[in-house]
Image (spheres, rainbow, N blue to C red):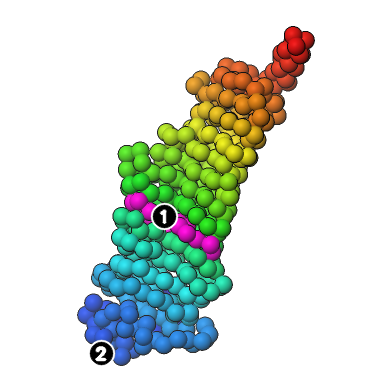
Amino acid sequence: MVVYYEPFLDSAQKLYVSKDGNDLADGKSPDRAFLTFGAAITAGGAPATETDAVVLVCLDNGTYTENLTIPSYVHVFAPNATLIGNHVLADDSSLNAQTVSASSGNVVSKTAGIGNASLNINTVTATADAYGIVSTSGELRGVTRTLNVQNGYGFGGTSTGILTFKVDNILITGTGYAVGLSAAGELSLSIGTIEDTSGTQGTAFSILAGEADIRINHCSADKFCNLTANGTLRIDGAHVVATVASTIAGKLKAVISDFDSSITPSGTSVVELICNKFDGTITTDGAQKVTLDAQEVDSATSIVVHADATVFVNNVELLPETHDASELNRVAVRPEIYRRAVRRQALAIANRL
């Protein structure tokens, strides 16, 4: 059994929960523990300030199947337990558990108040269409080691609140999304890896509205992102791999060491890619603005520039045509020489007209 220390355990009122407990007990000591967290929350009442805070302590590794609504100034400390259900946190509350999971609804959410709540979870699992961690009001912040999502969203969902999290691994096991926003919320995430284990079905990022700021080491998914006109994605990382082209209608700024994915800008999107190596295609179809700064492009790379699009590669504006890898690598390696060649080509076209 692993027990994690929390500073407030020393001073706050403590109520105990155990698989050997009894909801008719008073919960004031381990040998008089409650059987359920729900009974403990009821007994804890509604503390008015942090001075009156109540900590619900559970040190066993049992599985508790119940939906928790955690009031303000109530802290659930169950670092070895598994909690199955939908758990809602209020302002100034917290949840510390080994595993939380659900097959519908939101596994953990903050749905009211303008303050913050915090999580410290080893594993979050959202199966079927469940969402993982969601904030629709105020800020939900914390850390988790692993987040498993099947067909829903891992982080975000219908969030109009703020999520600030550090997560080591996000595993997509179905057709779901590692990170998603469908309303004007904010995400600030530090992610170790995103991996699509479903066999080419999952999407790493779906930003339909709001703003997402992401730091990531490695992202491997069927699709890198789906970004609509009201969405903004800023991402900084080492490696992105995706097999299906990403549709970009909003604003994308990506600083990625190796970017191995294709993108299709649409509408009036603005795309800025900064990378050591770009391996993919960029296909514009209208008045998009695209900037690519790359030291190298793969041999299969091409960029299609629409007549209404503005596309720069290493500060060189491309003509409205299809540009292959050999041409793009000349831009990457010798941009000044390429600029002069483009000017000569433009002048020759003008003279023919």
Please report the residue visible at 56 percent of the width from the left and 58 percent of the height from the top: 184
Would you say residue 145 sits in the magenta stretch?
yes
Classified by dominant secondary structure, the portion drawn in magenta counts as: strand
User: Vertically, is 292 above or below 204?
Assistant: above
The answer to whether residue 333 is seen in the rendering is no
**First in sequence: mark 1 vs mark 2:** 2
User: Which label sits on residue 61?
Assistant: none
Q: Hey, what amino acid is under mark 2?
A: Leu
Most extreme residue toward the left is 20
Q: Tell me the distance, in whole angstroms, between the alpha carbons under discs 1 and 2.
A: 37 Å
Dot 1: within a 10 Å radius of its alpha carbon, few (fewer than 14), some, or many (20 or more) residues?
A: many
In the displayed structure image, the side of residue 167 where residue 32 appears, left or right = left
User: Vertically, is 331 above or below 5?
Assistant: above
**Circles 1 and 2 in contact, beta carbons < 8 Å:** no
Residue at the disc numbered 1: 154
Q: Hey, what amino acid is under mark 1?
A: Gly
Which residue is at the front of the view, 57 or 134? 134
Magenta segment range?
144-161
Please report the residue visible at 49 percent of the width from the left and 43 percent of the height from the top: 226
User: Vertically, is 43 above or below 79?
Assistant: below
Residue at the disc numbered 2: 24
